[in-house]
Amino acid sequence: MPRIVRTLVVISMLTAVASCKKKPLLVSTTAYILGPQSMISVVSPREQSEIDPKILNASVLISTRLGPTDVKFCSGTLIPSDQPGGNLRVLTNHHCFAEVDEEGIATSELLPEACVDTKIYLGFFSGQTRSSTIVDCLPGSLRTSMDGDLSVFRLATQVPDQFQPMTLGSSNTNLAGRQALIVHYPDIKSAKVESPTGGPKLPVAQVTRDNCKVLGNFPIGHWQFDRSLPYSLRHTCDLTHGSSGSGLIDAATGQLIGVNWGGIKINEDGKTEAINVATGITFVNAFLNFNTAKIEQQAASALAASDLDAKKHQKTGGMLQTTGVTKKLGCGVIGVATDEGDKRLMALWMLPLALAFLGSVYRKGRRSEATGVSIALVLSLAALSGKSAAAVSEVVADGPSNQHQLAIDKPNWASAILLSNIFIAEYDSLVAYDQAAASVMKRERPLHTAEWLRAYVGWSYLKARGFAALEDSRLADQLASDPAARANARFIAEYKDGDPTVISAVGATFKGPDWVGRWHNLSDPFRETVPSVTVAEQRRQKLQQIASISTVDKLAARDSETLALYVASQVAERRFAEALAVLVGLAERDDSFRLPYELVQRTYSWRQRGSGKVAIQGL
């Protein structure tokens, strides 16, 4: 793990022992311990006599060996098998098994050691660790969800009868005010012992039950701060490193009502609220039943509608004003050099420049340019597309010719326009964030070659076909003056629109085989030539109606090509919530559209951070 740790130190300048983290803007060392002193205590004989043995024995330690002296650990919960008579499963967090990118952000890609070199410790109580039960993760059984920060896997063997699965709750509604408790394995030095299997010391079972209460779901105004919040529960139970993946338990019923992933601090109207967070049982059940798409789409639609309402209230001063959010993810990483690594570097990443910059650009674009650019974009799409006039007429006037045809038979020019706009928005938001952060930290802005290369290719595609990008002149100057331009001077000199080597170069910028594969599925239109002027004029008239689409409801019966064009126009206007609401449906029709969905999620996150509204930390 030292390589990852060193990378995180250089990139984030925040911690010497952190992993599975999201890069913070505003850091707090007390976002997990919510009171004046910690309410986390080692499970003692007293707790063993007072707490339901089923709860104690269903709470497990998960340890993944990353090297001879490096271990990554989390907490987890035993749940029933999904097969009659099958082995029990373990429920925990996605980020417990995730790789992190160059920014320290947990990705969809899993560690090579995930599940393969993962052991589960059952009954790992103080004074009883030598007699604890240790089982393996069944290779190939691991499944995860980034949106809910969840993972589940099957145990490789049967376990003794005292280890029974936790009973799952049914819904995370009407839970506000309920007393809760957590049995977990946090990285507290005084509670760590020698591992029965060798290597670094591991934490014994600990419990949080005092001052532990469910506060309820997050208000919709906070959903924009992190992808997991629409599905999460707020609570007051103390957590720290290693607590990630532990079960939030209803103290009265003994049922699992959430899966802890960290803490968040929100600075709103001069008041700071620090709370801990668990993915609610509603999303957990949907994840276990392979049925999260509907919940995700409902959340995206609700957020989009709320975003529109907030814009209306902004004129009367009713819009939520949030100055900062700190999020921590609580997995642990230990090794020979990290036992003394509990000291955290404090950093204050104030973002007034980014707020002013993005605020002025956004207002200017929305009022004087963005709407016009959006309409011009769609009209130019019609003018220069490669689709037949007859087919376009059928799409616009009558909807898709086959209402049962959900998947895209072949990627078309609409997907190229969509991806180009997303590449540009991703790069633009990241640069704005970096510029503000660099001015505060008094250091040079990091080199983001991958994002620059994608933006350059996307911008070149639009320019070659006569399409307008938002603030095109500024973007052109920005791309030309970026340090990445100097680093890729040869690429610029040899660049040829539609060249297969360019397509491969863009694919190489994505981390993980899923993203690369989805890019290649959608990249064919980047090789297409510009259509004739005659055909362009026919399409200009046929697709004018797309510019009038204003709500998600009107899109229900549209074909995938029209949806992609609509999303492209929303991204061009930096209306990411609206774009995400439609992209969820596109991804259901064609899994390749999971790539633009993930990219817009990331872009939306960068924009929120750059606006001074959100700062995220993971530990």
Image (tube, grey):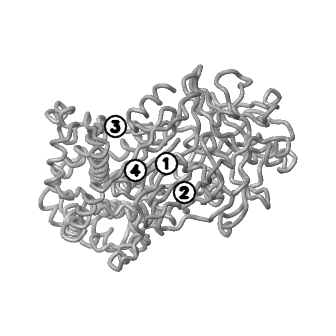
Q: Which of marks 4 and 1 is nearer the N terminus?
A: 1
Calculate the distance from the C-alpha at mark 4 to the C-alpha at mark 1: 23 Å
In the foreground, 12 or 591? 12
From the viewer's perspective, is 418 left or right of 490? right
Secondary structure state at the residue bearing disc 3: loop
- Residue drawn at x 68%, y 43% as measured from the top left: 76
Q: Mark 3 points at which residue?
A: 509
Per the image, label 2 sits on a secondary structure element best described as: strand
Give the CA distance from mark 1 to mark 3. 33 Å
- Cα separation, mark 1 vs mark 2, equals 10 Å
Residue 588 vs 244, above or below: the answer is below
Q: Which residue is drawn at 41% across and 53% down?
A: 601
Residue 247 place in picture, x, y as percent: 69, 50
| Label 4 close to label 3 by CB (< 8 Å) | no
The three-letter code of the residue at mark 1 reads Ser
Q: Give how far apart the Cα atoms at labels 2 and 3 are.
A: 36 Å
Is any atom of residue 525 visible in this view?
Answer: no
Badge 2: residue crowd in 10 Å (few <14, some 14–19, many ≥20)? many
State the residue position of label 4: 602
The mark that comes first in sequence, 1 or 2, is 1
Q: Which of marks 4 and 1 is in front?
A: 1
Asked if the residue at tag 2 contacts the one at tag 1, i.e. Cβ–Cβ closer than 8 Å, the answer is yes
Mark 2 lies on residue: 274
The kind of residue on which mark 3 rests is Thr
4 or 3: tag closer to the N-terminus:
3
Q: Which mark is residue 28?
A: 1
Label 2 to label 4: alpha-carbon separation: 24 Å
Q: Is mark 4 on a helix, strand or loop?
A: helix
The amino acid sitting under disc 2 is Ala
